[in-house]
Image (cartoon, rainbow, N blue to C red):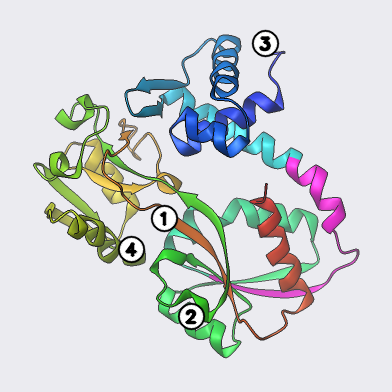
Amino acid sequence: MAHNITLRQLRYFVAAANSGRFSVAATNEHVSQSAITNGVLALESELGVELFKRLPQGVALTADGEEFLRHARQILDSVHDAVRLPRLREKGLRGTVRVAATYTLLGYFLPELLARFRATYPDVEIDLRDMDRATIEKAVSAGDIDLGVVILSNIQRLQRFGHAVLVRSRRQLWVAPTHPLAEQASPSLRDIAQYPYLLLTADEGERSALQYWKVKRIAPQIAFRTSSIEALRGLVAHNFGVTILSDMVFRPWSLEGKRIEARPIVDTVPHMDAGMIWHPKKTLPKPAEVFQQFLLHAYGS
């Protein structure tokens, strides 16, 4: 039984998992790098497993680390809600909040947050809509929805909207364990370009991906395009090719149970910024304002 695990250790572990580098985690947590290192080592000792692979360019989660990360985030979220939500709670709040989200965020980001919000405000109805980014922008501008949850980095002229970043998700290379690139700690885009590349088209994935390839004046060998993350995950696991996607959608197993690994990329690849947009001049209805504040506090420091 793990009796000696502290919330601080969990926080340091999650910070290291999010950034992929102990030094960056230390900066984000405002502590020394040795504090992060010692916290992770204490966790590994208590659990009896290795949570990270140590790489020349940082760290990568092991399969045990991926599994523990889910539990650690749930614990920290629960403590966060217990401490903060009583101050945010609007007694007897009723009404409807109209929210639209794009494919990736609807599937991999919002469900757990919606469940936490509903547990706090059971009388607020969430009118949830599945829309593409361009349609969400029009609906927010027209006042047809209160809040849009989108990939902010896909929006042109973001200053047209009220907006807030909720999560910044690192993009990494996904490979099968037997792929030659899995042997490299931090491959470059030029290394990746030597192999068949699987391109996700959902949420404007093709446009955003090809932009950072174009900056390096390299083109990937696109072998297959798909809008399905699960199809892409299966193809990577079965060694049909590799891809670059954000940590938000990473899972270490395909639907068939085959292993997938992630590797940091030595070149600068932009993070995926997920967040909210709203009309800059219209006052949000109270339920929407409370939902907005809930999301901000859920990802606040």
Residue 295 percent across, percent down from the top left: 66, 58
- Tell me the magenta residue range: 80-100
Identified by mark 2, the residue type is Glu
What residue is shown with label 1? 272
Label 3 crowd (10 A; few <14 / some 14-19 / many >=20): few
Residue 9 percent across, percent down from the top left: 64, 24
Secondary structure under tag 1 reads: strand
Secondary structure under tag 2 reads: helix
Label 4 crowd (10 A; few <14 / some 14-19 / many >=20): some
Residue 284 percent across, percent down from the top left: 72, 79
Look at the picture and state if 128 lies above or below 38.
Answer: below
Q: Residue at x 22, y 28 (%)?
A: 182
Q: Is residue 174 left or right of residue 46?
A: left
Residue toward you, 250 or 284: 284
Picture quarter containing residue 142? Answer: bottom right
Residue 202 — which label?
Answer: 4
User: Of tags 4 and 1, which is closer to the observer?
Assistant: 1
- Of labels 1 and 2, earlier in sequence is 2
